[in-house]
Amino acid sequence: MTDGVFPDRRYLEDFKVGDGFSYGAWEMTKEQMIAYAEIYDPEPFHLDELAAIDLGWGGLIASGPQIVGLFRRLSKDAFPNSETVISPGWDEIRWLRPVFAGDILTCHSEIVEIRLLKSRPGEGLMKFFTEMKRQNGDVVSTVLANWFIRCRPQD
């Protein structure tokens, strides 16, 4: 398992199934949560603290899509030099617990599949299963992310 940011250039061959990575630390703020919700997810429990409490949430909660978008930001920051081409999509997105203002979110990703792509010579598909956790270790969200990643150039 590796922690932190991975600055070295990394190609498909530099990863293997079972590799684990822990990274990120993002503090959710009330202002960010409301700003996101105003544009993309205007539910009362994302916009108004009292409404969220009245609805039984115990406080303002972050939008699920905002949380999975945050995973993308944290993973991009953690792997700045991976030869990632594009993500063809995410699977099995789950929001397991609410995220509140003040929660500090981190990620733990494990590679669950790697394979070469016949349709994209010189690239492979890598699948990461990721758990996002708050500061007390509670898993708040999971996602299976798919990355197209370049193979090491042949000299």
Image (cartoon, rainbow, N blue to C red):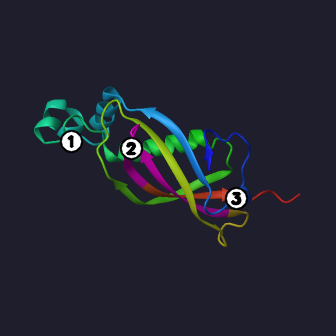
Q: Residue at x 68, y 43 (%)?
A: 81
Corner quadrant of residue 39: top left
The quadrant where residue 150 appears: bottom right
Residue 43 numbered mark, or none: 1
**Quadrant the C terminus occupies:** bottom right
The residue to which callout 2 is attached is 67
Q: Which residues are magenta?
A: 124-142
Is residue 8 one of those drawn in magenta? no
Disc 2 residue type? Ile
| Secondary structure state at the residue bearing disc 2 | helix
> Is 70 on the left or on the right of 123, as rendered?
left
Identify the residue at the far front of this view: 136
Q: Amino acid at mark 1?
A: Glu
| Vertical arrangement, residue 150 with respect to residue 42, above or below | below
Q: Which residue is mark 3?
A: 12
In this image, 98 relative to 82: left or right?
left
Q: Nearer the viewer, residue 85 or 103?
A: 103
* Mark 1 vs mark 3: in front: 3
Residue 57 position within the rendered picture, expressed as x and y whole percent measured from the top left: 19, 41
